[in-house]
Amino acid sequence: MSNPREVQLVSRPVGWPTPENFALVESAPTELAQGQIRVRNEVMSVDPYMRGRMSDAKSYAEPYALGEAMHGGAVGEVVESRADGVAVGDHVLHGLGWREEAVLDATSARVVDTSVAPASAYLGVLGMTGLTAYAGLTRVAGLKEGDVVFVSGAAGAVGSAVGQIAKALGASRVIGSAGSQEKVDHLLDDLGFDAAFSYKDGRVSDLLREAAPDGLDVYFDNVGGDHLEAAIGSLRLGGRIAICGAISVYNNTEAAPGPRNLARLIQTRGTIQGFLVGDHYDLAGEYAHKAAGWIADGSLTSRETFVDGIDHAVDGFLGVLRGDNVGKMLVRL
Ligand SMILES: NC(=O)c1ccc[n+]([C@@H]2O[C@H](COP(=O)([O-])OP(=O)(O)OC[C@H]3O[C@@H](n4cnc5c(N)ncnc54)[C@H](OP(=O)(O)O)[C@@H]3O)[C@@H](O)[C@H]2O)c1
């Protein structure tokens, strides 16, 4: 029988990553030390932030090492345990994705209940993705009842949670942008957005003004670039912008120009604040409680897009950068 496989980064992408930047290799057999578990990964996450870790530029997260397996969120079944409190058959959430089998200290894993939600949900709406949406809206953007909210990347994992959570928390109008008419239809027909547009259909500032003629109180930015500039231009008095991501520039080889209209923030007394979900894990319990209620009453639904097999993990990752996904992009192993 062959050994489990893992995906290594073998060269650092310049601009868009290509399959040549990665190698699928068999991992070396590892004995468990006391306190460790062996996990057969069932599902792993591919996320836009991983693009940043493939570069060696200084960032909040360590770059992936060349010639080693990459890592990221994953859920799998424990197949061997030398740790108290974690039994064979348990499912755990942990940080050693990009491989079929993970060996890690049990203290770095969290047992999850796959009878109440599928394993994939702990990587999406019930995990980091959902918490990002909740923390960004409530703590960073200070969402208030009656606010008009705009979110970009709205049909993606974070964005689709943002739109629905904003509604559940009393936003008066939620507007989303996405990259295709099919995604726009999904926002309007399935996720309860009040207005949506495809950013490929014209100038974002024009499309946004049409969708939010009275302006915005909150912009949740997943995209950066012209979306950010458009949102600054549509901000109302006291408007707040939470910078969550800037996927439109992640593959740029030169720095993109900043918004040209920052001076509008003087008139609107607007604020822009970036955030990292990692600083807001104290909200995880509060969010899990609320999310359970919203999921139960149907106000928070989540789509997932799967690719199958570790040999397609890189395709899944490239797909999330291209926008192949609706909702959370995941790799089933
Ligand atoms: N700050 C934090 O702690 C934190 C945590 C999690 C995620 N994030 C950020 O949140 C954002 C969303 O992450 P996610 O995991 O939910 O990914 P996602 O939205 O599910 O997937 C990324 C989406 O970005 C869109 N996109 C790609 N290129 C674009 C472009 N040039 N202009 C506009 N949209 C583009 C694509 O959809 P279209 O078809 O619509 O183009 C794609 O589906 C990312 O920027 C990510 O880095 C930040």
Image: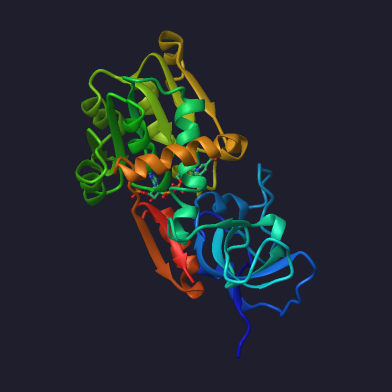
Which quadrant of the structure image shows residue 291?
top left
Residue 256 shown left or right of residue 168 in the figure:
right
Name the spot of residue 160 as percent of width and height, x first.
Answer: 35, 43
Horizontal and vertical percent for residue 315?
45, 66
Which of these two is toward me, 140 or 272? Answer: 140
Q: Is residue 183 left or right of residue 325?
A: left
Q: Position of residue 305 (x, y in %)?
A: 37, 60
Q: Residue furthest right?
A: 34
Q: Quadrant of the N terminus?
A: bottom right
Q: Is residue 27 above or below residue 293?
A: below
Residue 245 visible in rendering: no
* Depicted 246 relative to depicted 12: above or below: above
Q: Position of residue 258 (x, y in %)?
A: 49, 29
Q: Compare residues 51 and 182 and report the one nearer the observer.
A: 182
Residue 177 appears in view: yes
Q: Residue at x 79, y 70 (%)?
A: 33
Number of marks: 0
Frontmost residue, 85 versus 224: 85
Residue depicted at 70% across the width and 60% down the height: 106
Q: Is residue 62 above or below residue 331?
A: above
Q: Is residue 170 left or right of residue 9?
A: left
Residue drawn 41% across the image and 8% down it: 267
Is 172 on the left-hand or right-hand side of 283? Answer: left
Which residue sits furthest bottom? 1
